[in-house]
Image (cartoon, rainbow, N blue to C red):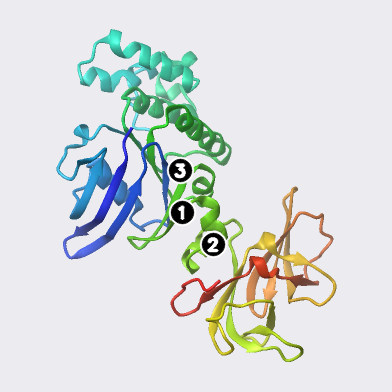
Amino acid sequence: MAAVQLSGIFKRYGDTQVVHGIDLDIDDGEFVVLVGPSGCGKSTLMRMVAGLEEISGGDLMIGGTRANSLAPQQRNISMVFQSYALYPHLSVYENIAFGPRIRKESSASFKPRIEAAAKMLNLGGYLNRLPRALSGGQRQRVAMGRAVVREPSLFLFDEPLSNLDAKLRVQMRTEIKALHQRLRNTVIYVTHDQIEAMTMADRIVVMNAGRIEQIGRPLELYDHPANLFVASFLGSPSMNFAEGVIVNRAQGPGLALQLAEGAGIVLDSVPATATAGAKVTLGVRPEHIETITQTPDAVLDVEVVEPTGAETHLYGKIGGNTWCVTTRQRSRVEPGQRVTLRLPAEHIHLFDTESGRRLV
């Protein structure tokens, strides 16, 4: 196992810089997920850690050793790719044994490791099969077995579940997390899927445009996003937003958010930095909104109703903004109806509209 430190890491292709001064410390045995939209630089960053991309600047430390100039095979890492990268003419056993054979290890030394990995990954009955006789999930487990047998200090996963269907992705998420809990190796995992990040990570690193937006434990980022980007990226359905100006309420004490379309949203509490006249963006997650019948904070004009079984999603407009309200009650609301809402003060997020920075 190994701790990993990235200090001022950047990547440049010619005059174009795609990764901008990344600082990140990963503890020994930690499972860290790099998440962000396509093109944000997360895979490039991982490839620099792996030695598959040259580091343009900064320092990479793996297990206390500066690794910038080390060849990939000298870094004691194993990488699992989006494509399984299996040899189609070799059996499962021979695919897993390929690395040890290349390193000229004796069969007696690596055979017990292969058998242990096959048992751990439920591949014991498939060792003599060719990859074409396996399902997608089984092929990915073979790729993981090949990584495990190397006994690396650091595992790198580059979007390993992207080619699987939804049911298999859920299953493989559980298996990868269980594998980490058994081995306790350091893991860096790259994905654009925020559900994978939330369910698997010890810590999440949210990236955007080659920069880190926020680092933290999954629920820390979910409950206290640092800015509008993180707030919008994490969560499904995503957080609702409404831009407006804070004003004094027309009736009674307190403040309200005046939307551009004329509608208003009552605010029970605002930070001292967000006084009347401030331009802010309000955010609230769909599951935190309550449906009430008296003294509402906002009114939703329902356009679409989506029952999913465990919960119902109501989509509609609040002052021209499309919002989603999630309820676990069996809703009898129909499109075209109006629903009165309460926005609990403890679940309201306010962001500075210009900078995107979190206010509360």
Q: Is residue 243 above or below residue 95?
A: below
Q: Position of residue 89 (x, y in %)?
A: 33, 20
What separation in Å lies between label 2 and label 3 (alpha carbons)?
A: 28 Å
Residue underneath mark 2: 224
The N terminus appears in which quarter of the rendering? top left
What separation in Å lies between label 1 and label 3 (alpha carbons)?
A: 24 Å
How many numbered callouts?
3
Closer to the N terminus: mark 1 or mark 3?
3
Which residue is at 19% across, 33% downward? 74
Residue sticking out furthest to the top: 108
Which residue is at 74% across, 48% downward? 310
Q: Amino acid at mark 2?
A: His
What separation in Å lies between label 2 and label 1 (alpha carbons)?
A: 10 Å
Q: Is residue 279 above or below residue 59?
A: below
Closer to the N terminus: mark 2 or mark 3?
3
Tell me the number on the disc at residue 162: 3
Whether residue 15 is visible here, answered yes or no, is yes
Callout 1 touching callout 3 (CB < 8 Å):
no
- Disc 3, SS: loop
Which residue is at 68% across, 62% downward? 288
- Disc 2, SS: loop
The C terminus appears in which quarter of the rendering? bottom right
Is 18 or 220 nearer to us in this picture? 220
Q: Amino acid at mark 1?
A: Gly
Would residue 177 be found to the left or right of residue 128 on screen? right
Q: Position of residue 233 (x, y in %)?
A: 50, 60
Which residue is at 45% across, 32% downward? 180
Quarter of the image where one finds residue 267: bottom right
